[in-house]
Amino acid sequence: MCGICGVVSLSGAPIDPDRLERMNASLIHRGPDDEGSYQGAGVALAMRRLSIIDLASGQQPIANEDATVHVIQNGEIYNYRELRAGLAARGHTFRTNSDTEVLVHLYEERGARFAEELRGMFAVAIWDQRETRLVLARDPFGIKPLYYRVDDDELTFASELKALPSGEVDFAAIESFLAFNVIPSPQTIYRGTRKLPAGHVATWTPVEGLQLERVRRVGATPTQNTRPEAAPVLAEELRARLRDSVRAHLVADVPVGVLLSGGVDSATLCALAAQESEERVKTFSIGYAEQSFNELDNARLVATRYGTDHHELVVEPDAAKLLPAFARIFDEPFADSAALPTYLVSQLASEHVKVVLSGEGGDELFGGYYTYVADLLASKVAPARSVLRPLAEALPSSSSRVSFDYKAKRFTRGLGLPSLERHHAWKEIFSPDARAELLGARRDADADPLDVLRERYRETQGCPELARLQDVDLGVLMVDDLLTRTDRASMAHSLEVRVPFLDPIVSSFAFGLPQDLKVKRFAKKRLLRQAVAPLLPAPIVEGAKRGFSIPAAKWLRGELQPFARDVLAPSMVQRHGFFEPAAVTSVLDRHVAGEEDLSRQLWGLLSFTLWAETRSTAAPALTSSGASG
């Protein structure tokens, strides 16, 4: 695991080595063990290394035999041994035992399409001196981040925004943030700076400039196959595939632990890791004094069954201390409140191991969200109270204590919408009207945050409807919410997180499953639960999903209310100049009064305002059209 960065001068001018050093130093938390750089004519590459594989000789950058191609990588390639054997048989010479060296030789053979053969998580930069070509590549799930920016005379890239020039704030990105509490790819908060989309390769040459191409797409496809086999046969195959993935993700020259939440996904990884590992597995769990959010008892059941070296932490509402730090960790507004427990459990794990497994992707692949239940029922039921009562827990919320009336209202409000818009409405943060109130004249009238969802949705025409909605979640919100959250919160503590569910051997199987083996009536993850039942205690297999969340609604009406009042004070909001102070105050007052659960909205406003505090300049001036200029 590493942090990478670089600069290409579009005119071929020399790159200031001190500037490169400053960029690289900003990423030290991603790789405190080592650093390396390469400078050529008009190009400079640098990296920070967290040593996981080939501790003695895996330093980067790594070059080919004649030093005309150089590579830096953030991530891990799990099939590198098989690739290395094939490349060596075809005459390539290897100087190290690292997975990164495979990339440079694979590029020599396949050019920019080298990434098609990789099994792993990666963000890669390759400089081809012979062709004067820069190649940037990102893994197909978007597990590892990569940002880039093209200005008049240079192209810069990095693992995190903090290493790049900032530029003007993009109000279209603010609109997206208000809708999702995150900013989806390819947008960033800064105009002109972009996230490289998952599964894409970007190439730059002096003649062609910057070209983007998607080389791998993971998710539902119109030609997906259904599986005719009986469920017990499929369950056995799924268990074998998960075991294969966990075995591959345990490859490391350092111990590998497990983040154990108490849910089915992480418990499965713990069970398989314990069976496949030669050493006693270390597990890490987090809990709350608020028992409706506490899963420590379930985590202990799994840890006890497999005899893990188990570590726990009970979280107190100290978000007032941590939220300002998150503004610096994420570099742009990011308001998934689960970043707080992810950060803390990563801190706990980093005291014992360098690598952990985590269960991201299980819900998107196998149908774990209550919104999928609601998606299937919505077209079949009338919005009557007798029907809505079983759906009380079927709508997203940061608190399990939100009233039935609130959840029923949210569900019925979405019933009249088209499928995709309805799916989004159940998770939406601020509605279009609420966004208009918050932004006022600053609003970018041409920006529609749902366009990124619609673009993904159109690609799966012909698939079953639930598969299309899962694909949207997998390809958009998982990349820019769950995986971003996990990457930044863990790398802040120099901890590598691996996600075995997001492995082609598992995902390709999941995409081909019939819908009713994922969700049927109120049952979720049906086949996954059947597959892992022999591995786990019954309360884990049969338990309801709680999610890796925090009691934000209660905290914001209690211990965190003074902090929220200070951060969102009208004078503070007015000084930053992004939102209408009265609209912000209204959200806070309505939540504190108990009229609605607006904790997700408040968390977003807090996160945004604290990010704005990190900026050294005022909000950008408005153009005559009302958008930022």
Image (cartoon, rainbow, N blue to C red):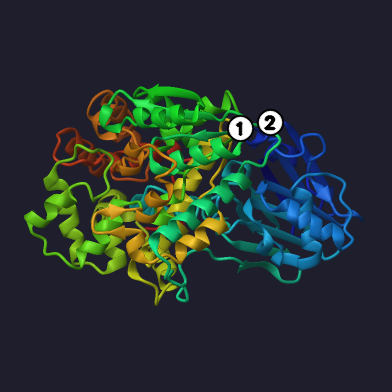
| Disc 2/disc 1 C-alpha distance (Å) | 7 Å
Disc 2 crowd rating (10 Å Cα; few below 14, some 14-19, many 20+) is some
Label 2 secondary element: loop
Residue 11 appears in the picture as rendered: no
Q: Amino acid at mark 1?
A: Ser
Please tell me whether residue 516 is drawn above or below residue 308 in the rendered image.
Answer: below
Residue matched to label 2: 32
Question: Which quarter of the picture shows residue 398?
Answer: top left
Residue type at the position of mark 2? Pro
111 left or right of 31 in image:
right
Provide the residue designation for mark 1: 494
Q: Position of residue 373 (x, y in %)?
A: 26, 57
Residue at image location 52% in from the left, 35% down from the top: 258
Q: Is residue 419 above or below residue 545?
A: below
Whether residues under marks 2 and 1 lie with C-beta atoms below 8 angstroms apart, the answer is yes
Q: Residue 162 shows which numbered tag?
A: none
Q: Residue at x 60, y 63 (%)?
A: 200
Label 1 CA crowd tier, 10 Å (few <14, some 14–19, many 20+): many
State the residue in front, 568 or 88: 88
